[in-house]
């Protein structure tokens, strides 16, 4: 039998071979599987979303969904609870609270609430947080009254840092607080209280402390007496005055007609007598001189 031969070449053509090799490349395979479908979907989506009516419809749908979520009962704040504050400070916080309850917690700026509370004179710091049950908790640390500051307009309650807390209507309302006066006294409250603590037996007679020249203190006692303290180590100077006062044999030094005890020079303390005592002294001296001449 005669063998039949075929003229068809089983080998792939050049272009077919190149196409097969390209399809076997990982980059082109990923492009065909993911790149082209993504590009088509992105193009169709961009064309669809470019319609203004479609955009408005989507925005309205998102707004309605957000409103539904924010107005759910678990996100509503119904009560303001103030912890750690006095009744007066609590009333001030409630009066300055910027929101009307009930209100969604999404509509509140908790940092702004905290800042507004800390701006109150009596508040040193505040912490604000949401509790379960729709409660907005405000935990307050109040400033503690340390002294009274005498100003041209009256007495002001200040804390240890000299920050004004409240207005003192009467001195008797704060009988346990020391009265300070003078320029810059509010900047040295701690030093003034240290002097007050060292007064010891003179404490019942103290009427206050006056800052002199923004450098040092004068201790003001009853009966118009003053103790002029030095700029450096005023507590020790006051303790020396107490020792001098208590070591008098008959009458304590400050129970006499002494107007001023000057301790500004530690090596040379001095006394200044009252005008009445000086007049009496000169009168007695004049009589003694007359008697000696006779």
Image (cartoon, rainbow, N blue to C red):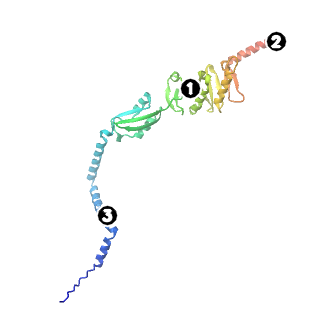
Question: Picture coordinates of residue 273 (x, y %)?
Answer: 69, 20
Q: Nearer the viewer, residue 223 or 20?
A: 20
Mark toward the viewer: 1 or 2: 1
Q: Is residue 89 above or below residue 205?
A: below
> Which numbered circle lies on residue 179?
1
Disc 2 crowd rating (10 Å Cα; few below 14, some 14-19, many 20+) is few
Question: Picture coordinates of residue 221 (x, y %)?
Answer: 61, 22
Question: Picture coordinates of residue 101 (x, y %)?
Answer: 34, 34
The answer to which image quadrant residue 285 occupies is: top right
Mark earlier in primary sequence (3, 2) = 3
The answer to which image quadrant residue 253 occupies is: top right
Q: Residue at x 39, y 33 (%)?
A: 81
Mark toward the viewer: 3 or 2: 3
Q: Element under label 2?
A: helix
Q: Element under label 3?
A: helix
State the separation of the CA atoms marked 1 and 3.
81 Å
Q: Element under label 1?
A: strand
Left or right: residue 160 versus residue 61 is: right
The answer to which image quadrant residue 264 occupies is: top right
Mark earlier in primary sequence (1, 3) = 3
State the separation of the CA atoms marked 1 and 2.
53 Å
Q: Residue at x 32, y 68 (%)?
A: 28
Left or right: residue 262 versus residue 118 is: right
Q: Residue at x 27, y 48 (%)?
A: 61
Disc tally is 3
- Extreme residue toward the bottom, this view: 2
Question: Picture coordinates of residue 191 (x, y %)?
Answer: 59, 31
State the separation of the CA atoms marked 3 and 2.
130 Å
Q: Which residue is mark 3?
A: 35
> Which numbered circle lies on residue 293?
2
């Amino acid at each position: 039998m005669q063998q039949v031969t075929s003229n068809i070449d089983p080998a792939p053509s050049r272009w077919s071979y190149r196409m097969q090799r390209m399809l076997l490349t990982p980059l082109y395979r990923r492009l065909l599987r993911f790149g082209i479908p993504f590009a088509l979907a992105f193009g169709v989506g961009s064309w669809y979303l470019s319609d203004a009516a479609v955009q408005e419809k989507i925005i309205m749908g998102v707004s309605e969904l957000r409103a539904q979520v924010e107005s759910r009962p678990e996100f509503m704040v119904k009560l303001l609870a103030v912890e750690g504050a006095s009744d007066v400070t609590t009333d001030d916080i409630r009066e300055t609270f910027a929101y009307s309850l009930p209100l969604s917690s999404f509509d509140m700026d908790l940092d702004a609430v905290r800042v507004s509370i800390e701006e109150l004179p009596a508040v040193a710091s505040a912490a604000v947080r949401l509790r379960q049950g729709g409660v907005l908790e405000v935990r307050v640390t109040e400033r503690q009254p340390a002294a009274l500051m005498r100003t041209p307009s009256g007495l002001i309650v200040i804390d240890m840092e000299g920050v004004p807390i409240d207005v003192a209507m009467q001195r008797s309302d704060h009988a346990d607080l020391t009265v300070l006066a003078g320029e810059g006294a509010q900047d040295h409250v701690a030093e003034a209280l240290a002097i007050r603590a060292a007064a010891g037996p003179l404490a019942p007679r103290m009427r206050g402390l006056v800052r002199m020249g923004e450098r040092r203190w004068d201790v003001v006692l009853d009966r118009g007496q003053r103790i002029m303290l030095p700029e450096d180590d005023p507590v020790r100077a006051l303790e020396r005055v107490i020792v001098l006062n208590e070591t008098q044999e008959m009458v304590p030094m400050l129970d006499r007609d002494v107007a001023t005890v000057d301790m500004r020079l530690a090596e040379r303390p001095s006394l200044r007598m009252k005008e009445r005592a000086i007049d009496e002294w000169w009168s007695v001296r004049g009589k003694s001189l007359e008697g000696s001449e006779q």
